[in-house]
Each structure stands twice: as C-alpha cells, then as structure tokens.
C-alpha cells in the first residue's frame, strides 16, 4: 500500500529527547526513515541553525517530509517557516490559524505556498480549538484552496464525536483537499476524556480509513503520531508501525 511506503513520524512523539541526533536514531529504531519535525526540535525562524539540523537528519538517513504544526497569525516573519521547509526539501507544512487573524494569515500563506511550491494542511484539533470543528475547517479550506487543505489528525477528528468525526468519511469528503494525515488513535472514557493508544487498537477503524484512502489514491504526507510514554515511546511506536504494515499485506 503506497501510503505505508511513505509513512513518517511526528518528532513530537520524541519530545523528551531534545537532541535531533537522538530523534533521528529513534525514527530509525521504530522502522521508519521519514519525519515531520516540530518546534520542540527546531526554530524555523532561524534558518541558518535549521540547516545544521537538516544535516543531522540527512546524515542519519532520515528525510524531513514536513514541518509543523506551526501557527500562522499574519506575521510577515513567518515566511521563514516556508524557507525552512524548502531548505529541508519538504513539500508540506501542517498548521493552525487563529480566530482573530485567519483572513490575513491565509492570504499570506497562499502566496508563500505558491512562491515556495509547498502545500499546507490545516491540522484538526478537536472541538476545543479554532480550526477543529467541521464547519470552521470547511470555511478555512474554502478560503485557502487549492494551496491550503486539510491535515487530518484522526484522533482529534474522532474527539468531535461519531456523528461528525469519522476519519474514513472525512477522507472521502475532502478528497484531493486532504494534504496530509496524522495517524493517531484515542480511547475515550465515559466522561469524554481521551488517552493515546497504539494506532488501530483504540476507537479508530484503521482498516476502513486505509481502504478509503486507497480508493481515493491518497498521495499526501502520512505521519504517525503517539503522544503517550514520552520518556519511552519507542515500544508503542514500533507496535504502531507493525500494526499498519500488517494491515497493508
């Protein structure tokens, strides 16, 4: 399955480890060679130092396929984020927008997207954050298309609730506007509280999602994410990789 051939991991999974050489080692340890680097491990406004970080991943045999999740709020200095992505050879940035500045920021990001040849995916973050609910997501994508689309975080989509938050349905609904996916899974308690678990072992119907993506010929950025066990995430992440590869056979 093409999706799994290009699977990467979000560096936030390794947030306990501050040195990028350790992060790169752990990416390889879980059986992957692609990463989405987050702000925990880089300052994307300091392009010079970021280029040194890129070399660390290159020397380790790890490709930087995306950066994020970044927040765009209309600051012209944020063009450096696109410069950083371009320097790494990444063709995608995952992002947030803010309620008071999204109109200005989306116009800026569309221009930078064209200038640098980098697509942008709006990261869904459940019902408690701007840009998480379906109607707001649709509004932002309508304003940003075709440069700006969706970065579907599967766990946070489910947090919206089963009537409106089915990742397989979102894959069909957004189609070509689906720029990237964060494969993440939650279990939910009776009070609605969530907890990370191995992808496919919680609430996420992983076979249905993979089937929907395959039918749509999804070719965007695929990122694995598991936020529990920050001091020792490798065992669970290995299980995530094995689970996804097993389903692809």
Image (cartoon, grey):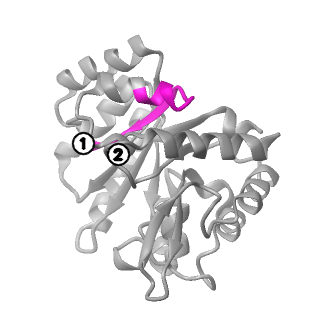
> What residue sits 40% from the left and 33% below the top?
116
Q: Name the foreground residue: 80 vs 111.
A: 80
Q: Is residue 101 above or below residue 16?
A: below
Q: Position of residue 59 (x, y in %)?
A: 39, 11
Q: Is residue 190 left or right of residue 101?
A: right
Pointer 2: residues within 10 angstroms few (<14), some, or many (20+)? many
> What residue sits 35% from the left and 45% below the top?
12
Q: Position of residue 201 (x, y in %)?
A: 63, 60
Q: Which residues are magenta?
A: 26-39
Quick one: SS at disc 1?
A: helix
Was residue 41 drawn as part of the magenta stretch in this picture?
Answer: no
Residue tagged by mark 2?
12
Q: Position of residue 73 (x, y in %)?
A: 23, 59
Q: Does the rendering let one see residue 85?
A: yes
Q: CA distance from mark 2 to mark 1?
A: 7 Å
> What residue sits 56% from the left and 52% below the top?
181
Q: Does the rendering let one see residue 142?
A: no
Q: Is residue 78 left or right of residue 174?
A: left
Query: Toward which corner of the image does residue 231 lie, by quadrant?
Result: top left
Q: Is residue 132 above or below residue 171?
A: below
Residue tagged by mark 1?
40
Quick one: SS at disc 2?
A: helix
Q: Position of residue 38 (x, y in %)?
A: 32, 42
Was residue 37 drawn as part of the magenta stretch in this picture?
Answer: yes
Q: Is residue 249 left or right of residue 173?
A: right
Query: Toward which corner of the image does residue 219 lie, by quadrant?
Result: top right
Q: Is the Cβ of the residue at disc 2 closer than 8 Å to that at disc 1? A: yes
Q: Earlier in the sequence, mark 2 or mark 1?
A: 2
Q: Name the foreground residue: 225 vs 75.
A: 225
* Quadrant holding the C terminus: top right
Q: Name the foreground residue: 151 vs 142.
A: 151
């Amino acid at each position: 399955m093409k999706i799994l051939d290009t699977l990467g991991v979000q560096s936030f999974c390794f947030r306990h480890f501050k040195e990028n050489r350790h992060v790169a080692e752990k990416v390889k340890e879980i059986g992957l060679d692609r990463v989405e680097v987050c702000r925990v491990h880089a300052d994307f406004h300091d392009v010079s130092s970021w280029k040194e970080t890129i070399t660390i991943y290159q020397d380790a045999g790890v490709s930087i396929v995306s950066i994020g999740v970044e927040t765009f709020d209309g600051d012209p200095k944020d063009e450096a984020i696109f410069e950083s992505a371009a320097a790494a050879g990444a063709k995608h940035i995952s992002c947030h927008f803010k309620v008071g500045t999204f109109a200005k920021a989306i116009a800026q990001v569309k221009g930078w997207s064209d200038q640098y040849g980098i697509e942008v995916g709006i990261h869904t973050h459940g019902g408690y954050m701007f840009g998480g609910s379906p109607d707001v997501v649709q509004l932002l994508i309508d304003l940003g298309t075709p440069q700006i689309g969706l970065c579907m975080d599967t766990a946070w989509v489910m947090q919206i609730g089963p009537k409106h938050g089915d990742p397989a349905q979102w894959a069909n609904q957004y189609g070509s506007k689906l720029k990237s996916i964060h494969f993440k899974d939650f279990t939910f308690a009776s009070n609605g509280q969530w907890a990370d678990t191995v992808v496919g072992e919680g609430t996420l119907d992983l076979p249905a999602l993979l089937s929907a993506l395959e039918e749509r010929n999804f070719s965007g950025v695929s990122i694995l994410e598991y936020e529990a066990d920050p001091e020792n995430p490798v065992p669970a992440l290995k299980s995530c990789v094995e689970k996804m590869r097993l389903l692809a056979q």
